Amino acid sequence: MTLKTTQKVTQILTAQLVQHLDILQYSINELEQYIYEKANENPLLVVTDAEAKSQYDEIMKLANYDFNTFSSQYSASKNGEFNMIEMRLAEKESYERYLFEQVPMHENLSAVDLKILTFLIQSLDHRLFLDVPLEVVVEKFNTTFSHVEVIVDLLQTFEPVGVGARSYKEYLLIQIDLDLFAPKLAAQFIQSDLELVATQAIKQLSKKYKMPIQEVKQTVQYIKNLKPMIQGEVFEATPYVIPDIEIKEVSGEWIVKLNRHYLPAVSIDEDYVALLKNDPAYKGYYQQSMNDALVLLQGIEQRDKTLYGLARWLIQLQQAFFTSGLEAIKPMRLKDIADVLGVHESTVSRAIRGKFVQVPHGVYALQSLFTKGLMNTSGKIDSIMHIKKRLKQLIEAEDKQKPLADQQLTNILCAEGIQISRRTVAKYREELNIVSSFNRAYG
């Protein structure tokens, strides 16, 4: 038996660091839930709900408004600026209430008709499609199948267009029925050959219905332009993406703003601190609670600093993206940001997970800004987005009678300096939902 001494460097993550990393990877919604969970566990934490805080601020602003101020604020909102008063007044009603308001327009309905119509409205799913078999309605109201179908037909005349449809196919047919200028065979295409329409099998449809190819193309294009989902002027509250970061240009300078106002305000209850701090019986409990509270506050602050630093570097590395959109995005890896921030790649991965950035031309997932690329002959790297855009341009400009095969597209791209294989071209073409050259030629 011998004794040996060795030196070894190991990295140990403290409980505090682990919690900071957890907070970093949370989206706004997840962080809000986490804050409330911590507040329930820790009596020293005081949490003010973001909505209550916002309402309080609005009430205080209203209390200080005079008539001129109100008028000017309302006018400002006409120019597209946010105005909380106008936003409150413009809250949309639910679809159910909106549909019931249309019932009195049909005066000749019997008591049974009204009961059936009410039941059908209450049986709509989130798409406003009818979510109950007609047989169930027939049995429930002890009536005939044709009677129920008449009430369904009535419901399908309500706004928004498509309400009461029993399938996606029927939803498209309702739109066609209400359009006086719809192509004469558009409904038949949908009823019998929706798959051929989806694959743009123009020649097959032309042969089956003995129609000129140009007329078939116009009919298919008309069907493609139908609304893919129910739309209307009145919407239910729907979940939406809350951007964690907002980046906008002000007087020629890019400004970064963290959307903290969506999160509840967190503070430490000084009265409770004074109560526990000087009580020897609660000394250990107080110290543990205070430490947990400080770790939470520090974790939120560290999350803000990391996101802010990330946003500032994104502006420098992807300036073309902020002015021109995704088409101008440059290839960028997690390692590139990790190196400039002086952190590990896993930290950057946590920072961008489930988070979104709002820029002048839209809202984007942070993860979508990290793109791969292919080396070109000049030694630079072309982004996949750029290559796909060029591929789409080549196909759109091709001779429609002699479409470019994947190998021909590969040769053109290689001649332009983009080193790419035929297999990769085929993959990108499929991701762009573009059919093969054979199908483009013969449908």
Image (cartoon, rainbow, N blue to C red):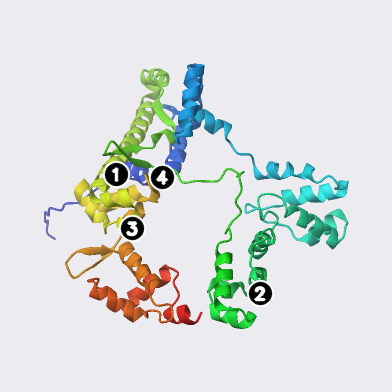
Mark 1–mark 4 CB contact (< 8 Å):
no
| Residue 184 in which image quadrant | bottom right
Mark 4 vs 3: CB contact within 8 A:
no
Q: Residue 307 is drawn in which quadrant?
A: top left
Q: Which residue is mark 2?
A: 192
Q: CA distance from mark 1 to mark 4?
A: 16 Å
Image x and y of residue 258, in percent: 35, 37
Using residue 190 as the reference point, say whether residue 396 is left or right of it: left
Residue type at numbered disc 2: Ser
Q: Residue 177 lies in what quarter of the image?
A: bottom right
SS of the residue under disc 4: loop
- Contact between labelled residues 3 and 1, with CB atoms less than 8 Å apart: no
Q: Amino acid at mark 4?
A: Ser
* Residue named by callout 1: 311
Asked which secondary structure carries label 2, the reply is helix
> Residue 327's mark?
3
Q: Residue 297 or 215: which is nearer the viewer? A: 215
| Image position of 152 with respect to 101: above or below | below
Identify the mark nearer the N-term, 1 or 4: 4
Q: Which residue is mark 4?
A: 27
Determine whether 348 is above or below 186 in the image. above
Q: What's the residue type where badge 3 is placed?
A: Glu
How far is mark 1 from mark 3, CA to CA?
19 Å
Distance (Cα) linking label 4 and label 3? 26 Å
Upstream in the sequence, badge 4 or badge 3? 4
Residues 184 and 403: in front is 184
Q: Above or below — where is 135 with respect to 98?
A: below
Q: Residue at x 77, y 47 (%)?
A: 118
Three-letter code, disc 1:
Ala
